[in-house]
Amino acid sequence: MTEPWQMPVTYGAPGGTRASDLMQYPPTGYRPSERRARIGHGDARFEFAWSETMTWGIQKRSGFRVLLADSPSEVSEQAYTPVQFDEQGEPIAPPKHDADVMFGADGTPFLKPGDTGWLIIPVIGPLGIKSPVRVVYVVDEPKRKGFAYGTLPGHPEDGEAAFIVEQRDDESVWLTVRSFSRPANWFWWTGYPMIRLLQWFYTSRYLRALAAPL
């Protein structure tokens, strides 16, 4: 039996949600999406929002169950790190986590590239759609933090989704959700209108998930 960490992502553009022109030039055959919302103001809100983001809090607060798989350390070490460039076209060194910040307030470890598991989408009662994903990159900048996951075989879609929290100069805190996706196979294509509706529904939940009172 193939373990989740052994599976490759199901699309050919890992890191694609980081492209500045994603909405104009998505990977061929994929539908792009970008939505953002102001979720609060000030340092306390920013700390809360990014800490929740980095412990799957957005997904959990939106109704998903998250099951993580054990992965060998080499999976993280060999995880894809997309190349970034500054305004002059010079490559930027990939960001690194602060070694002193490893866990969220509830003791959940912060996610890292290579982390693999299942997002269980609720359907009826305890039943749900088990959707395997892998973290493909992490953003760890002073005022901008988040991550993206890519789909694995068995997910109803092919593609990638990114969840980025940023604090702007006016201290406002924003969440941006970017993605590109398409149904994974003919079965899911037959339900494409419903998939689009569910995407809109859950993205709306994502954008509200971190705006709760502190």
Image (tube, grey):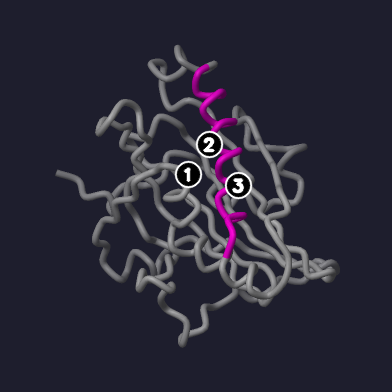
* Residue assigned mark 3: 208
Q: Secondary structure at mark 2?
A: helix
Asked whether the beta carbons under mark 2 and mark 1 sit within 8 Å of each other, the answer is yes
* Residue assigned mark 2: 202
Asked whether the beta carbons under mark 2 and mark 3 sit within 8 Å of each other, the answer is no
Sequence-wise, the earlier of marks 3 and 1 is 1
Q: Residues within 10 Å of mark 2 (few under 14, many from 20)?
A: some
Magenta-drawn segment: 194-214
Q: Residue 129: where, in percent of width, then height?
A: 33, 32
Three-letter amino acid code of the residue under disc 3: Arg
Q: Residue at x 48, y 39 (%)?
A: 11
Disc 2 to disc 1, C-alpha distance: 7 Å
Q: Residue at x 74, y 39 (%)?
A: 23
Residue 203 painted magenta: yes
Three-letter amino acid code of the residue under disc 2: Tyr
Three-letter amino acid code of the residue under disc 1: Ser
Q: Residue 7: where, in percent of width, then height?
A: 31, 47
* Residue assigned mark 1: 62
203 is higher (above) or lower (below) than 107: above
Q: Residue at x 63, y 47 (%)?
A: 177
Residue lying furthest left: 1
Q: Residues within 10 Å of mark 3 (few under 14, many from 20)?
A: some
